[in-house]
Image (tube, helix red, strand yellow):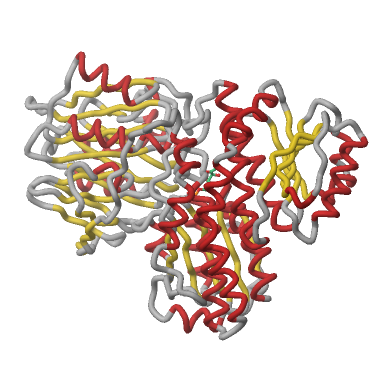
């Protein structure tokens, strides 16, 4: 999703901006651009469709030099990926703007501006912002006032970076809904959509709040709140490790990240387990007292994170007897929800910047309908973490591949820690907590053993290359694992895939079964195995071809219709985490064989900061 980088410094900023854009590439984008104010106080702009490397090439041929500048990676929302739609957008060669988010009332604003004689050169919603600012400059307003008057008219979520020849030493930044961080250097200031963009130049950051308006020069950094009162926002030192873009032995980040799962899980558990209990590792004051009062849990998330929530609900109700509901954030945020007593509101997010998840949290905070909010997140300084009462971090390390892998399995790990802490806070079931602790300790080694099946799974994937559809089956807490398997396959290999709880087959999807559509099932040896085996027989009897990840103890026989990857005997509680891994590899290799852009699948973005 769109990324912003800006800088005001006492040295040329193009290199800094370009490096920042490279660091935001993981978010997904289709074009990139940069604008600086040069020594003659003129705006110079370069834009390119495709990768940041294409922009770099253009800049190499025709460098732009200036001490103040803004840059952008665009993920198309309004208007196709094309150079004329790429940011920065200009008005009258006097203002340049980069924007992340969506201006909902752009149509009306565009019509008004057209009546005033402004010519639009793009299909974007952003272009209204730059012309609107210019229209106020035309009335002799200062740059600050022109931007203020403009944002007062904007509806929607946005982060903006603005420069103008009228005040060539100033960079203006505004945050309303979309993430934006200010980076503080010595006599220089930066803005970025996240801290990663600026880690090369600083580790000191100010996290802007909604409504914040910043006027930045080399000497001054003034931040005004939504009422335009000057405010002091805390300066935080980032602890985020500067991620390496080194793929090492791997061809894709997704493959590397699948293989990083044992280490990521180890890091997530580090210092959090004792022999018979989990250490209080949730951040926030009075957390254990609050957990003791919890009588219901609502989990809200999107995509893969939502699937982690679905699995956790099975565990939560089974182990704690606390009612647990799960919903996708884009639905939850817009409906009237019946309040539940003493509800812990849990948001799950790899990035901590997902717009719908943040909006759902905002909604329950405004309604004051919850006991407390807890975010489970992989990014410490993210918006979600900062907006929640409590946070429980995963330590997966940066995930660069768009398809989430290690972030998902580490989310499941911390969800088990949360369940253990709920049990501990309520003084219940020490034996259950001991079981969780013991099983979690085994997890990294078990996952290592699954990763050894890499080449076997690769062979299986070869049979998926020419398929158009696939059906994933699971039962109990393996049903969301099947959902996650289907999501991974469709997002990176573009094969249509659906997941069903195996018991539902005969209520409709059995009609689809033929020799063409592969049916993938996850079959650990749990209390549901015999039920699942009957469901698989129903498929076989109708000529379906099965691809199974099955516990040997389940004694399922392989034949020309039944292809099996044997799975080790593992504790039930961690089975969903373990069975996710071969499904990730199956999708990965299918995509590799199909030749898709595995790490940056079409139309998708890593961090979904618009609704
Ligand atoms: C799929 C995937 C997405 C994300 C979703 C939520 O592989 O990565 O479905 O899970 O966009 O993102 P986060 O977890 O950052 O809130």
Q: Position of residue 531 (x, y in %)?
A: 85, 54
Q: Residue at coordinates 72% horizontally, 25% vertically from top-left? A: 468
Q: Residue at coordinates 22% horizontally, 58% vertically from top-left? A: 237
Which of 307 and 546 lies nearest the eye of the viewer?
546
Q: Place residue 283 in its image quadrant.
A: bottom left
Which of 330 and 20 lies nearest the eye of the viewer?
20
Q: Is residue 146 visible?
A: no
Q: Is residue 520 visible?
A: yes
Q: Position of residue 227 (x, y in %)?
A: 29, 62
Which of 386 and 212 lies nearest the eye of the viewer?
386
Q: Position of residue 42 (x, y in %)?
A: 14, 26
Taking 488 as reference, is 59 above or below it?
A: above
Left or right placement of residue 229 versus residue 283 in this view: left
Left or right placement of residue 309 versus residue 121 in this view: right
Left or right placement of residue 604 versus residue 323 in this view: left
Q: Residue at coordinates 47% horizontally, 55% vertically from top-left? A: 265
Taking 542 as reference, is 350 above or below it?
A: below
């Amino acid at each position: 999703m769109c990324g912003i980088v800006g800088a005001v410094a006492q040295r040329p900023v193009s290199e800094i901006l370009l490096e920042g854009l490279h660091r935001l590439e993981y978010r997904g984008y289709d074009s990139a651009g940069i604008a600086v104010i040069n020594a003659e106080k003129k705006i110079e702009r370069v834009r390119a469709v495709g990768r940041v490397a294409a922009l770099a090439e253009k800049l190499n041929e025709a460098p732009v030099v200036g001490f103040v500048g803004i840059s952008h990676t665009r993920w198309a929302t309004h208007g196709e990926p094309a150079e004329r739609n790429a940011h920065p957008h200009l008005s009258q060669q006097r203002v340049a703007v980069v924007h992340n988010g969506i201006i909902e009332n752009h149509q009306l604003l565009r019509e008004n501006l057209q009546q005033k004689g402004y010519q639009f050169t793009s299909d974007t919603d952003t272009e209204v912002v730059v012309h609107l600012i210019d229209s106020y400059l035309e009335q002799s307003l200062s740059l600050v006032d022109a931007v203020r008057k403009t944002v007062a008219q904007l509806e929607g979520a946005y982060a903006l970076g603005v420069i103008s020849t009228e005040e060539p030493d100033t960079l203006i930044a505004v945050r309303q809904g979309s993430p934006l961080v200010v980076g503080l250097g010595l006599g220089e200031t930066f803005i970025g959509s996240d801290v990663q963009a600026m880690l090369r130049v600083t580790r000191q950051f100010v996290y802007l709040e909604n409504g914040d308006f910043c006027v930045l020069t080399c000497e001054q950094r003034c931040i005004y709140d939504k009422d335009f009162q000057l405010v002091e926002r805390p300066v935080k030192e980032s602890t985020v490790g500067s991620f390496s873009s080194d793929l090492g032995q791997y061809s894709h980040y997704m493959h590397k990240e699948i293989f990083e799962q044992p280490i990521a899980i180890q890091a997530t558990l580090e210092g959090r387990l004792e022999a018979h209990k989990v250490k209080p590792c949730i951040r926030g004051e009075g957390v254990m007292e609050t957990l003791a009062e919890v009588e219901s849990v609502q989990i809200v998330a999107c995509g893969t994170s939502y699937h982690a929530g679905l699995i956790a609900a099975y565990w939560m109700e089974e182990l704690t007897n606390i009612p647990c509901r799960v919903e996708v954030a884009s639905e939850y945020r817009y409906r009237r929800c019946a309040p539940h007593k003493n509800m812990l509101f849990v948001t799950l997010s790899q990035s901590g910047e997902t717009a719908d998840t943040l909006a759902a949290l905002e909604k329950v905070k405004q309604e004051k309908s919850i006991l407390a909010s807890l975010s489970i997140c992989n990014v410490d300084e993210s918006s979600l973490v900062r907006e929640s009462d409590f946070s429980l971090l995963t330590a997966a390390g940066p995930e660069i591949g768009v398809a989430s892998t290690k972030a998902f399995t580490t989310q499941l790990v911390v969800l088990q820690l949360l369940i253990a802490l709920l049990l501990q806070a309520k003084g219940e079931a020490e034996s259950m907590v001991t079981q969780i602790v013991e099983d979690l300790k085994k997890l990294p080694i078990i996952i290592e053993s699954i990763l050894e099946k890499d080449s076997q799974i690769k062979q299986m994937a070869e049979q998926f290359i020419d398929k158009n559809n696939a059906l994933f089956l699971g039962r109990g807490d393996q049903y969301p694992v099947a959902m996650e398997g289907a999501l991974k396959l469709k997002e990176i290999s573009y094969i249509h895939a659906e997941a069903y709880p195996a018991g539902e087959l005969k209520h409709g999807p059995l009609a689809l079964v033929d020799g063409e559509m592969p049916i993938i099932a996850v079959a650990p040896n749990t209390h549901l195995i015999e039920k699942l085996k009957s469901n698989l027989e129903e498929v076989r009897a109708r000529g379906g071809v099965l691809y199974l990840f099955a516990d040997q103890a389940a004694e399922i026989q392989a034949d020309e219709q039944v292809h099996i990857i044997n799975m080790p005997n593992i504790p039930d509680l961690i089975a969903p985490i373990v069975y996710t891994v071969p499904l990730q590899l199956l999708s990965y290799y299918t995509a590799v064989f199909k030749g898709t852009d595995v790490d940056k699948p079409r139309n998708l973005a890593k961090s979904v900061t618009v609704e």
